[in-house]
Amino acid sequence: MNVTDTKMNGAESLVHTLLANDVNVCFTNPGTSEMHFVAALDHIAGMRSVLVLQESVATGAADGYYRMARKPASTLLHLGPGLANGLSNLHNAKKGGSGVVNIIGEHASTHIALDAPLTSDIEGIARPVSHWVHTSHSAADVGADAARAVQAAMVSPGQIASLILPSDTAWNEGGQPVDAVDLPSPDPFDASLLEQSSRALDGPETLLLLGGEALTENNLEVAGRIAAKTGCKLLSEWSNARLERGEGRVYVGRVPYPIDIALEVLKPFKRIVLVGARAPIGFFAYPGKPAILTREGAEILTLANAGADLTAALVALCEAAGAIDTAPAYVVKASLPERPTGPIDLDTLAAVIARAIPQDGIVVDESVTTGRAFSPATKGAARHTWLNNCGGSIGYAMPAAVGAAIACPERKVLCMTGDGSAMYTVQSLWTMARENLDITVLIFANRSYKILRGELTNVGVGNPGPKAIDMLSLDRPALDWVQMARSMGVNAQCVDSCEALEAALEDGLAGTGPNLIEITL
């Protein structure tokens, strides 16, 4: 491009620059300050604009999109309050290592001093959930600023870049679009620890703990070779941005969420090598329980952090272990549970889901309580990709499913979430219907924030009274997910038996648009 069109405004230069840098999806909830960007999206071909009804849907969708497309989408957010609405899922995206380019409207520079009702410290709001924050100062700067935002978003494993666009920089002429820029490479792994890491993995009391890009299919195969040669065990973190699973792939269990179980699982390991993962810690602090989950005195070596070249680290470790020609361990054979019948409980639910996962499906999982049995039950299912909530802020699954479906329209998406979590971003259903996305949503309707019932006990509240229980219940009135989904254009039904759930999943996954299944537990 590299040509200045004095008639081009800043908003137009922004769109041209994003497209030149392969950012061609925008999850948007615009306002007055963003109207020139909206106009530019209207007359410049190439950008898919996806309207959402609440900004946390936009930011969560951008998270899911990056995990599957491996490139950022943009969001369009309205001033500080609009950004604030999207913070919870930006937190999740940041913890998950997703690249996102936020475009945040701002008042015109001449208007800020007037302290209008929507004036706020946008940079201050953005900074805790962003790796890179910048405000454009003129129309001529917007293109270059947008290119730098894309570069920042693509820093491995992925970063949140927030570009603030005062409305006069959008409407003023003098925009200068920028061609595709060079993207950053991952950092090198810590080669000084390679030999020590190789020696550390020498039997069943040693662990190779994986995260991030180490969980791609090819990297899992390399990890399986290392495990077969050295006898070490393989695990992943509890929450993974993206994990390739199913028939023919190397199976990796997860460090359990419940702290007592995690302590037992990790107790045998005297040496742990980290590739893309952090040393295991508890999700929360609990009275009288340790926050560090590894055994006392365990040797922990960080061969490669999440931002490093994890493929190079695993290949080098495999070579150092002499495992290049070793057949990988833990390769999964096709194996499905028996078809369950009768009432739905956690075990039969896991079995029905395992049997239903479609070939090359994408499973978006926010079933923190209900889904703890899903991993072992689904290990031998058809090949699929599993996405977890990495930040713990609820309301993640349905927006992430929107982004995943747009990134991979040829793949089926199965979204699993609890009724309490889903209410945070229920507006996602409307976008699913509007875009006719191939998503089947499972709502686990236990009529409560069930995980918090368990946390009452975990933190030492042994006998909660009626007021405490009432604050964690969703039964007065009960939520009707079938009515809510249908009101937003999504086909829906409610089931309470294994047979009905199996039939509903078959119908939902056979279609090409969104479906919702409420499962009464």
Image: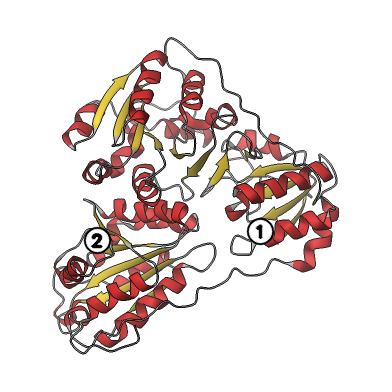
Q: Position of residue 206 (x, y in %)?
A: 79, 45
Q: Position of residue 395 (x, y in %)?
A: 35, 44
* First reached walking from the N terminus: tag 2 or tag 1: 2
Amino acid carrying label 1: it is Thr
Residue 311: mark: 1
Q: Nearer the viewer, mark 2 or mark 1?
A: 1
Q: Position of residue 403 (x, y in %)?
A: 36, 50
Q: Which residue is mark 2?
A: 82
Q: Position of residue 208 (x, y in %)?
A: 72, 48
Question: Picture quarter containing residue 250?
Answer: top right
The Cα atoms of the two marked residues, 2 and 1, are separated by: 38 Å
Within 10 angstroms of label 2, few (less than 14), some, or many (20 or more) residues?
A: many
Q: Quadrant of the N terminus?
A: bottom left
Look at 38% across and 24% down and name the residue there: 506
Question: Picture quarter containing residue 513?
Answer: top left
Amino acid carrying label 2: it is Gly
Above or below, 78 against 164 in this view is: above
Above or below, 495 against 113 in this view is: above
Question: Picture quarter containing residue 263?
Answer: top right
Look at 53% across and 34% down and name the residue there: 458
Above or below, 501 against 236 in this view is: above
Residue 179: mark: none
